[in-house]
Amino acid sequence: MTSQLIYGLVTGILFGFFLQRGQVLRYDKQIGALRLMDMTILKFMLTAIFVGCVGIYLLNDLGLAKLSIKSTVLGATIIGGLIFGIGWGLLGYCPGTSMGAIGEGRWDGLWGLLGMVAGAAVYAESYPLMKRTVLTWGNLGKITLPGILGINHWIVVIVFVLAGIGLFYWFEKKNL
């Protein structure tokens, strides 16, 4: 248990370091991403997703980790995504970058922290109602893309990574 906490702390510190070094904590990068004029943040996040995807499936295949697939609930995902997007658009930070901004001494990131705390409180208070409504709308169960397609997960991983590399190349060609 303690080792998991230490791994989590080290991973969080490293991720924060890379957020700062990748300049994705900068307000102009955030706004550039929202305006689809600067793809620095998208490239950073896609890189994290691709590395995480390969790592998780590799660890799972080696028996060092176990996947815990959550149910896909369209209502909750769509509403949560809208709330997330509105908050990001209003603040200019997503939750992770608002914490990084605070770490850099930019106090406007505190609005993001306050929004997260307020959102968690509202979610906790409204959970009983949402459990009967929003959290049931469009419940597709525990699905994965490889499971839907009936193919090995490595085929999907490789296709996504190659598509990502192609997208990165296109971004660089367009100076995005």
Image (cartoon, rainbow, N blue to C red):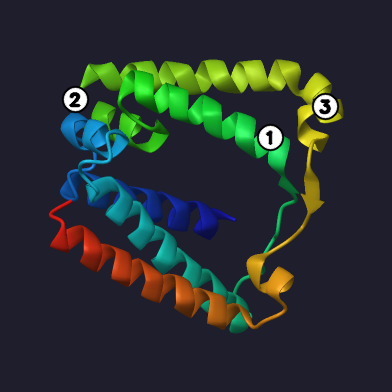
Mark 2–mark 1 distance (CA, rounded to whole Å): 34 Å
Residue drawn at x 61%, y 76% as measured from the top left: 60
Residues at marks 3 and 2, CA–CA distance in whole angstroms: 40 Å
Depth check, front residue: 82 or 108: 82
Q: Secondary structure at mark 1?
A: helix
Category of crowding for the residue at label 2, using alpha-carbon neighbours closer than 10 angstroms: few (below 14), some (14–19), many (at least 20): few
Indicate which disc residue 105 carries.
Answer: 2
Q: Is residue 55 left or right of residue 168?
A: right
- What number is the disc on residue 165? none
Q: CA distance from mark 3 to mark 1?
A: 9 Å
State if disc 1 and disc 2 touch (CB < 8 Å).
no
Q: Are marks 3 and 1 in contact (CB under 8 Å)?
A: no
* SS state under label 3: loop
Where, quadrant-wise, is the N terminus in this rendering? bottom right
The residue under label 1 is: 76
- The tag earlier along the polypeptide, 2 or 1, is 1
- Residue at 28% across / 35% down in the picture? 100
Mark toward the start of the polypeptide (3 vs 2) = 2
Say which quarter of the image contains residue 138: top right
Total numbered circles = 3
Dot 3 corresponds to which residue? Answer: 133
What's the amino acid at mark 3? Thr
Give the residue at x 29% y 46%.
16
Pinpoint residue 53: horizontal percent, then vertical percent: 49, 67
